[in-house]
Image (tube, rainbow, N blue to C red):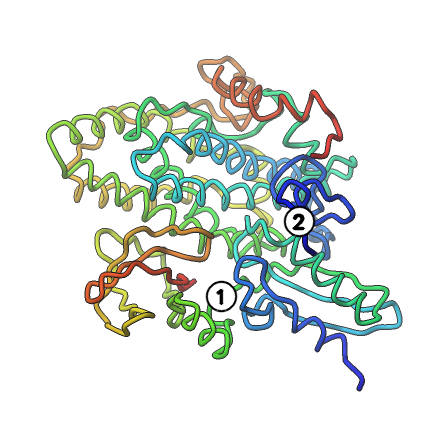
């Protein structure tokens, strides 16, 4: 059985969400086999994501193990990562892990970025009981991409991947 | 990879999979095109990246000083996350600056080995916060201004600046909403919280003038479609400030913001000089002593 470099790279998981592959998350942008070795292109979720170094090393290690001696990892900044790139399978894995997956990312209209004061009108279903009435506890969670919410029905707190 | 204990994992240097400690990070722009846009002066581009990068770096450090001091655990998390986003933006911009100036200085050299007069940040970001009210007001002003700036930078002719801008907009929109939420909560809160946040507004406001006065480098690069002329941000920022202060029942200070001297006119005095010209307060020296001390004492140190 021949395993392509793309198949190998697609199995590497995110260090902070280990049940998700880089492909599920949409941060694996391209895998190319050339005469010069394998070139993998990834994109950061947020500018300050501290996991990028670990992801790069994990990718190179997985490719080495599969016999790809020369592997380079490139960063691509544009287009900027959006939660819309998380695959349906990735969203299902998030929900199974108790993390509410993101809905569709907000579409920018013309003009300045709108200011949000007070309650945001976002409807996030509780990943445990499925109830639709949940509230935001904090806009920033354990990692840059998550916020903290609480279910008003079963009262359980949970995390939610913010739509960006 | 598995280890018997966490310390072993932290000190494992068989590879470069280190996280957020030490110096000697890998280049965050690895693989990003490094060519300069046609007809753009490399020195100007380097200077501009330092300005926008230093704003983020110094603001990030001031925010980090609030971690363990915020009123609630959730706010520790928020402030740490905001500081991390800004640090990420700073790393990209300082790396771009080092490449453009082509002097071999990387992001570490630029962050850790420059003296205060070589920093190009606006003075707003170096100001110490006497209380939480000052923090949220300063963050509101900074995030509102930076969001407007990054949004325009996303259309830059320089593809790296454009990418940093487009990415940063998504992040800083959250920072602004966080700060605005607190300003409203405190302003429209108790008599005490209202008074203290109004004092904070009065205290921070004089620093806003500098934000909208262009430096000659900004003007030159804006003319060639690379940078943003900060005077073009004023209207959008004023509208946001007015809306937040109105909902927060706060009064906008009567006195007009101090219009600092235009750069390049030879006025380098402390009174009239600006952060963009390398004129800073004692507060920046204090920040750099803290931020650079260890890296300077152990140059090239990895831990």
> Residue A154, located in which quarter of the rendered image?
bottom left
Considering every residue shown, the one lying at the far front of the view is: B4
| The C terminus of chain A, quarter of image | bottom left
- The residue carrying mark 2 is B28
> Residue B11, located in which quarter of the rendered image?
top right
Numbered circle sitting on residue A82: 1
At horizontal 31% and vertical 25% (from top left) the residue drawn is B131
Q: Is residue A129 visible?
A: yes
At horizontal 17% and vertical 44% (from top left) the residue drawn is B247
Horizontally, is B121 left or right of B77 in the view?
A: right
Q: In the rendered view, would you say B212 is above or below A54? A: above
Chain of the residue that carries numbered disc 1 in the rendered image: A
Give the class, few, some or many, for how many residues have Cα within 10 Å of label 2's Cα (few <14, many ≥20). Answer: many
Residue B225 pos. (x, y %):
57, 51
Q: Nearer the viewer, residue B289 or A90?
A: A90
Horizontally, is B255 left or right of A78 in the view?
A: left
Horizontally, is B5 left or right of A138 in the view?
A: right
Q: In the rendered view, would you say A60 is above or below B4? A: below
Considering every residue shown, the one lying at the far left of the view is: B191
């Amino acid at each position: 059985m021949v395993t392509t470099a793309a198949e190998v790279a697609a199995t590497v998981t995110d260090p902070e969400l280990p049940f998700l592959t880089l492909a599920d998350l949409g941060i694996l942008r391209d895998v190319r086999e050339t005469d010069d070795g394998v070139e993998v292109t990834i994109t950061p979720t947020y500018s300050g994501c501290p996991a990028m170094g670990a992801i790069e090393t994990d990718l190179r290690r997985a490719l080495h193990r599969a016999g790809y001696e020369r592997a380079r990892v490139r960063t691509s900044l544009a287009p900027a990562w959006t939660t819309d790139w998380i695959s349906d399978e990735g969203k299902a894995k998030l929900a199974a892990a108790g993390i509410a997956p993101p809905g569709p990312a907000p579409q920018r209209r013309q003009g300045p970025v709108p200011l949000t004061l007070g309650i945001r009108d976002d409807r996030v279903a509780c990943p445990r009981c499925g109830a639709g009435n949940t509230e935001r506890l904090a806009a920033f969670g354990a990692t840059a991409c998550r916020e903290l919410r609480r279910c008003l029905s079963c009262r359980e707190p949970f995390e939610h991947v913010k739509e960006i | 990879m598995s280890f018997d204990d966490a310390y072993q994992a932290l000190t494992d240097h068989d590879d470069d999979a280190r996280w957020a400690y030490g110096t000697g990070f890998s280049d965050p722009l690895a693989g990003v095109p490094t060519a300069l846009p046609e007809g753009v002066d490399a020195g100007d581009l380097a200077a501009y990246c330092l300005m926008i990068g230093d704003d983020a770096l110094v603001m990030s450090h001031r925010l980090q000083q609030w971690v363990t001091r915020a009123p609630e655990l959730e706010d520790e998390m928020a402030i740490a996350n905001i500081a991390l986003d800004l640090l990420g933006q700073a790393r990209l911009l300082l790396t771009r600056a080092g490449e453009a100036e082509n002097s071999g200085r990387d992001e570490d050299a630029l962050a850790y080995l420059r003296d205060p007069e070589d920093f190009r940040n606006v003075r707003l970001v170096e100001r110490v916060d006497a209380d939480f009210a000052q923090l949220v007001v300063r963050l509101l002003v900074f995030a509102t201004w930076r969001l407007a700036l990054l949004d325009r930078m996303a259309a830059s002719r320089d593809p790296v600046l454009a990418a940093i801008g487009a990415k940063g907009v998504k992040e800083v929109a959250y920072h602004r909403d966080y700060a605005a939420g607190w300003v409203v909560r405190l302003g429209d809160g108790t008599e005490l919280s209202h008074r203290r946040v109004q004092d904070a507004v009065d205290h921070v406001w004089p620093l806003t003038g500098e934000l909208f006065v262009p430096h000659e480098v900004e003007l030159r690069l804006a003319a060639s479609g690379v940078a943003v002329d900060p005077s073009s941000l004023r209207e959008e920022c004023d509208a946001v400030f007015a809306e937040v202060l109105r909902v927060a029942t706060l009064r906008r200070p009567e006195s007009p913001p101090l219009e600092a001297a235009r750069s390049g006119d030879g006025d380098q005095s402390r009174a009239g000089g600006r952060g963009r010209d390398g004129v800073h307060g004692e507060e920046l020296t204090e920040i750099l002593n803290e931020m650079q001390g260890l890296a300077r004492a152990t140059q090239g140190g990895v831990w």
